[in-house]
Image (cartoon, rainbow, N blue to C red):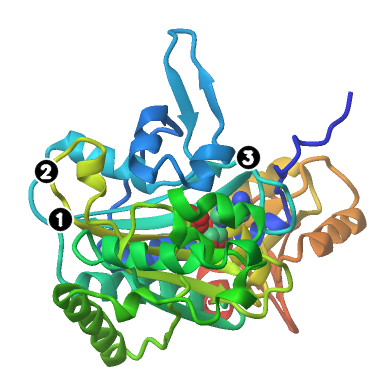
Amino acid sequence: MSFQPPPGTDDIGAPQSHIWREVLREWETWADCYGYPLVMTPLFEATDLFERGVGDATEVVTKQMYTFTDKGGRSVTLRHEGTAGVVRAFLNAGVKGAWKGAYSGPMFRYERPQAGRRRQFWQVGVEYLDVEGPAADAEVVELGFRFLNAVEVAGLEVVLNSLGDEVCRPGYVATLRGYLDERRSQLCDESVSLIDSNPLRVLDCKVCAPVLGDAPAMKDHLCAACADHYAGVKASLDRLDVPYTEDGRLVRGLDYYTRTAFEYIATDLATAQNAVGGGGRYDGLAESIGGRRAPGVGFALGIDRIVLSSSRAPSPPVDVFVISETNPSDALVASSVLRSEGLRVDFDTEGRSVKAQFKVASRSAAPARVIVSDSSGPVGVRYGNDNIDLPIGEVAEWLMQRLR
Ligand code: AMP
């Protein structure tokens, strides 16, 4: 029996999981700060939702979905992204007017596994629905940017583009298709196969990039309304001091984007996969899955890659290690008191020698020690060079002043 997890999946425990927990906690704080309440949707959905929502010519839908027939004969698919499910949930709730939701959880794609590209990976994201103005797009871009900065993603850059809408995109796509058609012989097989079905995706192809230098760019073909919207987003980002670069090649993988598209890149990440997140506006998505018109904007950020690219050193998992000179039960009770006062505490349950307990304490990396030498008297507290005896009820306050 092998104990390896399935290909493209990972077991993530301590010490690596310390940084995961910190990043996910930081995420909750930022989502909350921008007014995005938690929304939780199923890990699997009817396959049809993704085919209609994400687009049946996208790579994810054609090649990467984990799809199976359940015991009731329904075709279901493990979610490969959060947006379609959240928009479905929004439509199901029947709400009117601006609506916000933040999610966090695993996604599944049948990919060729490599560093930063997993078959099960973790995304956090937000969706802001029933909003049309460029200030919404700018708020969303800013939120991602501030969060990624807070978790110290090294070499962070924001890349921005506009993909137009149903008014101006068809004309642009026809122009692009003509341009690609003339260069068929210079393109890779994959790109040639996309010319008819999804020519925008050809712009994404790293292999073909050298021959596409003068390809027409969407931002030069925007209709007046889309050009205005794009200018509004950029002006707001300028006022917020959120730096960005524009890239006419940024098309994003999923079909549903309209107008604003953006990505967050960790330029210092040493893997081939350096996009830590991306998003955009999807004004037609709610209708394409059979609902009412509900324009929206959102992003998804990949926590696996954020953890890889974060230069933040995780803080120690516990504040205090309690050592008992009597028995583990006294350490348990002292730990319980300290925990109830908000400290993070661990101790040895196995009745080892005091010396052995100190060794376990060092391994735990806890910056403070509390030494219990009788069940009712004061305890010894050690923190750095400080060494003091205190009643157990006064330890938390004394330590908090030093730890926080
Ligand atoms: P997407 O939903 O494709 O726009 O991806 C948004 C973000 O999720 C990307 O920028 C990555 O950080 C992350 N991501 C997407 N696919 C994977 C994957 N297979 N493994 C790890 N992270 C991923």
Left/right placement of residue 323 relative to residue 156 reads right
Separation (CA) of disc 2 from disc 3: 34 Å
Residue at image position (45%, 24%) is 76
Q: Quadrant of ligand 1?
A: bottom right
Query: Of 175 and 78, which appears nearest the observer?
Result: 175
* View extreme (left): residue: 96
Separation (CA) of disc 1 from disc 2: 10 Å
Q: Quadrant of residue 28?
A: bottom left
Q: Secondary structure at mark 2?
A: loop
Q: What amino acid is labelled 1 in the image? A: Asp
Relative height, residue 55 to residue 163 (above, below) = above
Q: Position of residue 72 (x, y in %)?
A: 43, 8
Relative height, residue 171 to residue 101 (above, below) = below
Left/right placement of residue 238 relative to residue 135 reads right
Query: Of 302 and 348, which appears nearest the observer?
Result: 302
Relative height, residue 186 to residue 62 (above, below) = below
Q: Which mark is residue 130?
A: 1
* Residue behind mark 3: 110
Q: Nearer the viewer, mark 3 or mark 1?
A: 3
Q: Are marks 3 and 1 in contact (CB under 8 Å)?
A: no
Q: Residues within 10 Å of mark 3 (few under 14, many from 20)?
A: some
Q: Secondary structure at mark 1?
A: loop
Among numbered discs 3 and 1, the one appearing first in the sequence: 3
Q: Nearer the viewer, mark 2 or mark 3?
A: 3
Q: Position of residue 181 (x, y in %)?
A: 50, 62
Separation (CA) of disc 3 from disc 1: 32 Å
Residue at image position (84%, 42%) is 351
Among numbered discs 1 and 2, the one appearing first in the sequence: 2
Q: Secondary structure at mark 3?
A: loop
* Residue behind mark 2: 95
Q: What amino acid is labelled 3 in the image? A: Tyr
Q: Are marks 1 and 2 in contact (CB under 8 Å)?
A: yes
